[in-house]
Amino acid sequence: MIFKRKQPSVAPELPKQPSAQAHRRNDEPSYISADMVIEGNISTEGEIHIDGELRGSVRAHTCLVEAHGQVMGTVSAQYVLVRGKVYGPITASRVTIQKGAHVEGDVVHDGLSVEHGSFVMGNISQNAMLSPGPAPASMAPPPFTLMPPPKPPGTDSNSSN
């Protein structure tokens, strides 16, 4: 009697599917190059560099608007660096507006750096100031009292002539 050894079945190895976390968070930044114009909203959990034109909002972990970049819409991120132009509100934990940048819109931040030579037009406020409820007394501005201007010496109305 002859016995044959059974060959083990070899199932083809399936390519591994990236995990949901790996799929959502890519370590490589995304780029909108200088020759691109995008109309619509962009959302990424990673980093985006905008050197072209975006007509819409961007939501990212990190958003860099490069020197030739232009955003016409809302920018929301943990960190925003502006070297180019933003026409719309910026909301971020940290915002850096570098020399030569142009921002027209409100900036809401936890930390802000604005370099000399940049242009910013809009309201600037800290996230802590926007929390609901009344502001603590320590954050309230001191009361303002309008005082009359001082009188020149020798014009005192109480002195007799």
Image (cartoon, grey):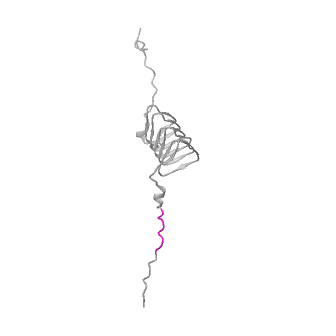
Residue 10, image x, y percentages? 46, 74
Residue 57, image x, y percentages? 55, 46
Find the residue positioned furthest to the top: 161
- At x 49%, y 38%, the residue is 67
Q: Is residue 2 rendered to the left or right of residue 32?
A: left
Find the residue positioned furthest to the right: 39
Confirm whether the magenta stretch covers residue 11.
yes
Find the residue positioned furthest to the front: 2
Which of these two is toward me, 157 or 53? 53
Quadrant housing the N terminus: bottom left
- At x 45%, y 34%, the residue is 99
Q: Is any part of residue 74 visible from this angle? A: yes
Is 94 situated above or below 147?
A: below
**Count of picture labels:** 0
Confirm whether the magenta stretch covers residue 146.
no
Which of these two is toward me, 32 or 76? 32
Residue 95, image x, y percentages? 45, 41
- Of helix, strand and loop, which mostly describes the magenta segment? loop
Which of these two is toward me, 111 or 134? 111
- At x 48%, y 67%, the residue is 14
Quadrant housing the C terminus: top left
Is 10 situated above or below 124?
A: below
Residue 7, image x, y percentages? 44, 79
- At x 45%, y 51%, the residue is 28
Q: Tell me the magenta residue range.
A: 10-17
Q: Is any part of residue 132 visible from this angle? A: no
Is 8 situated above or below 35?
A: below
To which quarter of the image does residue 137 belong?
Answer: top left
